[in-house]
């Protein structure tokens, strides 16, 4: 366990360093993005120097990094150039929407993927299995933004039955249960887009694992004992399918959070971490980019650690082997 913690600490530092360096290696000037090229042209050189000094942009990269680490140790993750507010406050205002969207999509896609994968693997070679396999393979070829745009054009533009953008109706003054319904209504399309994108991975992995497990001696023994098909399918075979699915969910969380949420949130103008990261890239808002990547890193490493511990619970042999 100590080795795992050290590995996570090393990974955290490397990602922290990359999250600091990569935004600064991008072309463009944050002052230009903040104030505009025309405004900067009208500024005196002295004023430009003062602005650069206030944002620590005039210092060497290594000094900026140590200033960043010092502030981070004090719980200060920076001050946003664009939002003119502490980064932590900005991130906290966006983070809950991404957790709602990603968390719900991850849970739904995993549950649906595991159930359909178990049923498909159990009926290997039959029409049900072939139809599901073709459908899931087709879904896996579509990027999240394509599905999102298709849903947007169909249900929002053409049919007009669901909202075009946002996480709730602006200036509606809603509260209580009506507000909850409004939030859920705005959540439907981005949630459906992400769930459809994520479900194929869980399905294919579960189905392939199920097909392999069904040939194991303990499954043949369970059938020989006269257990019902449902018991064999879920209690014996299905339980053993969970190990690779849990691993895939934990490892793939970071990729899904960054790529899936980014594109879908931008398509639907959903006010989550994906939209915040995208706007920060456009504005060259280094502190917000660093803060966003830091929060994402903490969540990804935390979830991977939780998966590591859960894996030991599901299969005690993993802990004993180490």
Image (cartoon, rainbow, N blue to C red):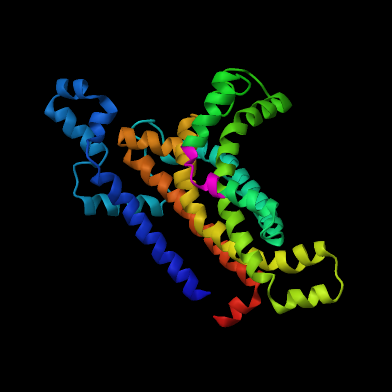
Task: Give percent across and percent down for residue 117.
Answer: 66, 56
Position above or below: 275 against 160: below
Which quadrant holds residue 27? top left
Looking at the image, can residue 304 be seen? yes
Residue at far bottom of view: 321
Looking at the image, can residue 299 be seen? no
Task: Judge from the rendering whether residue 95 lies leftward or rightward of residue 12; answer left or right.
Answer: right
Residue 164 versus residue 14: which sits nearer the camera? 164
Task: Give percent across and percent down for residue 33.
Answer: 27, 30
Magenta highlight: main SS: helix
Task: Give percent across and percent down for residue 50.
Answer: 20, 33
Bounds of the magenta span?
Answer: 137-145
Position above or below: 94 against 206: above
Task: Give percent across and percent down for residue 138.
Answer: 53, 45
Residue at 53% from the left image edge and 61% from the top image edge: 304
Q: Does the magenta-highlighted stretch encompass residue 141?
A: yes
Which quadrant holds residue 104? top right
Which quadrant holds residue 13? bottom left
Residue at 50% from the left image edge and 55% from the top image edge: 252
């Amino acid at each position: 366990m100590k080795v795992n913690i050290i590995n996570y600490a090393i990974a955290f530092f490397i990602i922290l360093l990359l999250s600091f360096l990569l935004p600064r290696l991008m072309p463009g000037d944050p002052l230009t993005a903040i104030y505009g090229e025309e405004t900067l042209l009208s500024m005196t050189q002295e004023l430009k120097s003062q602005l650069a000094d206030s944002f620590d942009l005039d210092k060497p990269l290594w000094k900026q990094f140590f200033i960043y680490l010092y502030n981070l140790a004090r719980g200060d993750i920076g001050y946003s150039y664009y939002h003119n507010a502490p980064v932590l406050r900005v991130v906290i205002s966006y983070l809950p929407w991404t957790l709602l969207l990603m968390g719900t999509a991850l849970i739904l896609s995993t549950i649906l993927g595991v159930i359909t994968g178990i049923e498909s693997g159990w009926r290997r070679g039959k029409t049900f299995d072939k139809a599901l396999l073709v459908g899931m393979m087709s879904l896996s070829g579509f990027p999240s933004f394509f599905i999102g745009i298709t849903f947007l054009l169909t249900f929002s533009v053409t049919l007009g039955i669901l909202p075009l953008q946002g996480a709730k109706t602006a200036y509606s003054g809603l509260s209580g249960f009506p507000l909850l319904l409004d939030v859920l209504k705005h959540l439907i399309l981005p949630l459906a887009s992400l769930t459809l994108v994520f479900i194929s991975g869980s399905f294919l992995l579960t189905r392939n694992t199920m097909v392999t497990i069904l040939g194991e001696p303990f499954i043949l023994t369970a059938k020989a004992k006269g257990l019902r098909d449902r018991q064999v399918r879920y209690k014996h075979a299905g339980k053993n399918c969970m190990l690779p699915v849990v691993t895939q969910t934990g490892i793939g969380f970071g990729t899904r959070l960054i790529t899936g949420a980014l594109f879908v949130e931008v398509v639907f103008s959903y006010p989550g971490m994906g939209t915040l990261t995208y706007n920060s890239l456009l504005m060259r808002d280094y502190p917000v980019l660093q803060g966003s990547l830091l929060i994402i890193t903490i969540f990804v490493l935390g979830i991977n650690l939780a998966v590591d511990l859960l894996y030991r619970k599901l299969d005690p042999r993993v802990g004993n082997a180490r």
